[in-house]
Amino acid sequence: MKLREIAHSRAGDKGNICNVSLICYDPKDYELIKSKVTAERVKEFFKGIVEGEVVRYEVPSIAALNFVMHGALAGGVTRSLRLDLHGKSLSSALLELEIEA
Amino acid sequence: MRRRDAIRIGAGAGYGGDRFEPAIELVEKGNIDYLVYECMAERTIALYQQDKLRDPSLGYNPQLERRLAPVLRACKEKGVKVITNMGAANPEGALRKVKDVATSLGIKALKVAAIVGDDVLDRLPEFSESPILETGLKVRDYLERAVSANAYLGAEPIVEALEAGAEVILTGRVADPSLFLAPMMYEFGWSADDWERLGRGTVVGHLLECAGQVTGGYFADPGYKDVPRLWELGFPIAEVPAEGEPIITKPEGSGGIVTPATCKEQLLYEIHDPSAYFTPDCVADFSGVHFEQVGPDRVKVIGGWGRERPRSLKVSIGYRDSFIGEGQISYAGSGAINRARLAAEIVRRRLELRGIKLDESRFDLIGIDSLHGDWISRGKGEPYEVRLRVVGRTTSKAVAMAIGEEVETLWTNGPAGGGGATKSVREVIGIVSTFIPRESVRTRVVVEEVGA
C-alpha cells in the first residue's frame, strides 16, 4: 500500500533543509506509520536527493510524523539548480512510498 | 492592561506575490480588527535593497500601493489596523508612500508607523567573527559581497507602535508569526516574558502566516482531499480570546475549507522540532497542539506552549553569489525521450567544444526525472512528451548566457521536432545566516500622521 492511501503530507524549506510531514487521515494508523516509516527508510527512499541525515519527530497529538531532511535542497532555495527549488514536491514523493499494511 | 477580551485577525497575504482580492473580502465581510500582510521571503530584502541602491526612496515592496489602496479607507472607517512587512528594505520609504496614498484617497488623521532597526548591513563588520550557520565560514568571508543584512525582529516594536496609536504599521524583517502575535500582546496586555501565552499566540501566528495555506490552499488532491472553489479561496481569520482557545475560520461564502486536516498540514509547515520553534519572542512548543472542528469551516486550536526566548537574534545576509543560465526545449511523440537525450548530449558537447566550464550543472528531462531523479519515478511509464532543461551556475554572466544559447540553437541544429525553446539568465543572490546578541540591535518606531 502506498502511504498516500492513509496519510497526507506537506513539505517546507529552510535553507538547505527540507521538512516533510506525514499526517494520518485516521489516527488509528499512527502506530502503523510510526513502525514502518523510519528515518532510515525515508533516507534510503530519498537517496540521490537528500545528502545529509534525516531526523524524525513524532507528533502524536495530531497523529503525524515530521521528517527533517538535511542537505535536501541542493544548496537551498537561493542557489539550487533544481526545477523545484523549495523541494515542495517531495511531499508527493513520500506518499509514493510502499508499506506493508 | 487588557484592552479587549477577544480580537479577530485576518491574513491578507501569505507571500509577496499572493492574490489581491482575499484581503479586500476580509475587510468587507470578515469583521476583522487586524489585517496582517506577510509578504517577505528569505531573499526578498536582498532584492529590494538593490532597488534602494538605484533610488533611495524605493526598497519597500512594490505592491504596497496595489494592496493597500483598495482597503485603506474601509480600514480607517471600521477601525481595522494594518500590520505588514511590506516595508522590506525601506520601512520609512513605505511610510511616505502610504501617507501619499492616504492623502490621495482623502483619508484624514491616519497614524502610520515604520519599524526601523532590523537593517544591520552597515554594522556587519562588528560581527566579522560570527560563524555562518550554513557553511561553517565566518561573516567576514561575506563582507565584500554582502548586499543586505537584516535581523529578525520580534513583536515588541510593533506593540510599541500600537501603543503610540499607529493604525498602519510597516516593518522590515520581522519573524512571520510575530506580526500576528503583536496585536494579541497589545490588546490582551500580555507581557514580553509571558512565555506560555506568547507560545500559544505564536501557534496562531504560524497557522496564519501563509494565508490560504490553512484554508484549503496548497491542500487539494482530487479524490483524496477535495477543496471547493479554490479560484475564490478565502483567507484565514483567527478569532483569538484573551483567555481560552482560538478558532481558525474564513469569510462566509468564500472558497476553500478549514478543517483539522488543513490546520495540521500548516502546523508542521517549515517546522523542524515541533517542541522547539524558535522565534525572537519565545521558543514555542507545538508538540501538544491538536484541532477540533466546532462548526463549518471553524476549527478550534487546542494547546500550545512556550519557553524563554533565545538570547540571540538571527540575521539573514544576502550576498552576490553567481549567475544561473538556463535553456529548455520540448519533444513529443514516439522517440521523444531519445531525441531529448540526444539534445542533451549535443548541448553538453557544444559547451565542451566552446571551452565553457560551469561550477555546477544539471540536465533534466521534465516529465521523467526533473523533480525526484530517476529512482523514485522508475517504472512509472513513459510520457507522450518531455522537456529538456539545461541549467548551470557560473560567476560570469556571459558564460551563463551560453547555456540558453546552446539549447536555443537546437531549433535548427538539433534533433527533429524540438519546440518551445526558452532561455534565461538570472543573478543569484545567496542567503546565509548568523546570530548576533539581541542587545546589539536597537529598534526605533517612527509614527507620523496623515493630514496632521
Image (spheres, coloured by chain):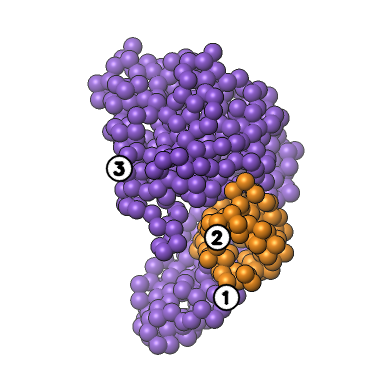
Which residue is nearer to you in this view: A62 or B145? A62
- B79, above or below B428, in the image: above
Evaluate whether residue B232 shows in this view: yes
Residue name at image x 66 percent, y 58 percent: A31
Say which amino acid is labelled 3. Gly
Secondary element type, mark 1: loop
Q: Colour of chain A?
A: orange
**Residue B374: mark:** 1
Say which amino acid is labelled 2. Ala
**Residue A7: mark:** 2
Which of the two discs, 2 and 1, sits closer to the camera?
2
Q: Label 2 vs label 3: CA separation?
A: 29 Å
Which residue, given by chain and number where applicable, does mark 3 sit on? Answer: B253
In the picture, measured across the screen, residue A23 lies left or right of residue B249, that is right
> What is the chain letter for disc 3?
B
How many labels were placed on the picture? 3
Q: State which tag comes first along the sequence, 3 or 1.
A: 3
Residue name at image x 50 percent, y 33 percent: B246
**The C terminus of chain B, quarter of image:** top left
Query: What residue occupies the far bottom of the structure in this picture?
Result: B334
Near mark 3 (Cα within 10 A), the count class, few <14, some 14-19 or many ≥20, is few
> What is the chain letter for disc 2?
A
> Can you tell which chain is drawn purple?
B
In the rendered image, residue B259, in percent from the top left (x then y), is placed at 46, 47
In the rendered image, residue B302, in percent from the top left (x then y), is placed at 56, 37
In the rendered image, residue B44, in percent from the top left (x then y), is placed at 49, 43
- Are the residues flagged by discs 3 and 1 from a single subunit? yes
> What is the chain letter for disc 1?
B
Secondary element type, mark 3: loop
Near mark 1 (Cα within 10 A), the count class, few <14, some 14-19 or many ≥20, is some
Which residue is nearer to you in this view: A100 or B87? A100
In the rendered image, residue A40, in percent from the top left (x then y), is placed at 72, 64
